[in-house]
């Protein structure tokens, strides 16, 4: 069975349901990004300060302390699990979209690589490998770009694609 483009053949009610799901999922994902920006964790220095603390900086506007091991494991555990479900569910829909095989394969697999690199990198940085903060920023940006691209592709094909069967 050919799954490439199957999304275009879904009945209107299912397309509306899936569109609503992707929109709400995207609101949740973007809300998470807003939270990250509120903690100043969008720069390498901000990421390091968020997890390693800034107790030595007496001029810091907000005092932050190094996260404990239990807190780090909780953060990593919850994020890896929840983000893997987010990308799994979006990936199912993307798998059914009409796309070139290489593009689809990249968009399906890359988020899982980025999840491991991002949160593994945060843990390694917390352990003292400070240069990982740069890798965390890069993998986090790539993960967000892939999420956004995938969500737009799925929504476009569910709502606006001209080849859709009515």
Image: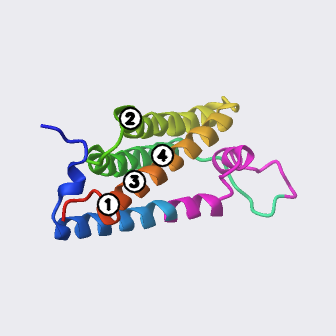
Q: State the residue position of label 2.
A: 109
- Magenta-highlighted residues: 31-59
Helix, strand or loop for disc 3: helix
Question: Counting residues from the N terminus, which is met first, the one under dot 3 or under dot 4?
Answer: 4
Of all residues shown, which one is farthest toward the front? 162
Can the viewer see residue 68? no
Going 82% across and 48% down the picture, which residue do you hit?
Answer: 56
Q: Which color mode does the image show?
A: rainbow
Question: Counting residues from the N terminus, which is met first, the one under dot 4 or under dot 2?
Answer: 2
- In the image, is 115 to the left or to the right of 141? left
Q: State the residue position of label 4.
A: 146
Going 32% across and 49% down the picture, which residue do you hit?
Answer: 85
Helix, strand or loop for disc 1: loop
Is 51 magenta? The answer is: yes
- How far apart marks 4 and 1 lie (CA) works out to 24 Å
- How far apart marks 3 and 4 lie (CA) works out to 10 Å
Is 72 magenta? The answer is: no
Relative depth, front residue between 77 and 141: 141
Label 4 CA crowd tier, 10 Å (few <14, some 14–19, many 20+): many
């Amino acid at each position: 069975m050919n799954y490439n483009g199957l999304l275009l053949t879904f009945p209107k009610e299912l397309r509306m349901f899936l569109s609503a799901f992707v929109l709400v999922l995207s609101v949740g994902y973007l809300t998470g990004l807003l939270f990250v920006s509120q903690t100043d964790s969008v720069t390498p220095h901000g990421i390091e300060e968020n997890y390693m603390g800034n107790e030595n900086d007496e001029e810091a506007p907000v005092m932050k302390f190094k996260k404990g091991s239990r807190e780090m494991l909780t953060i990593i555990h919850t994020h890896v699990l929840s983000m893997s479900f987010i990308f799994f569910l979006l990936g199912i829909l993307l798998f059914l979209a009409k796309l070139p095989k290489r593009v689809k394969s990249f968009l399906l697999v890359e988020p899982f690589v980025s999840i491991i690199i991002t949160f593994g990198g945060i843990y390694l940085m917390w352990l003292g490998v400070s240069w990982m903060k740069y890798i965390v920023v890069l993998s986090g940006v790539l993960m967000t770009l892939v999420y956004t691209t995938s969500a737009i592709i799925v929504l476009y094909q569910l709502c606006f694609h001209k080849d859709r069967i009515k």
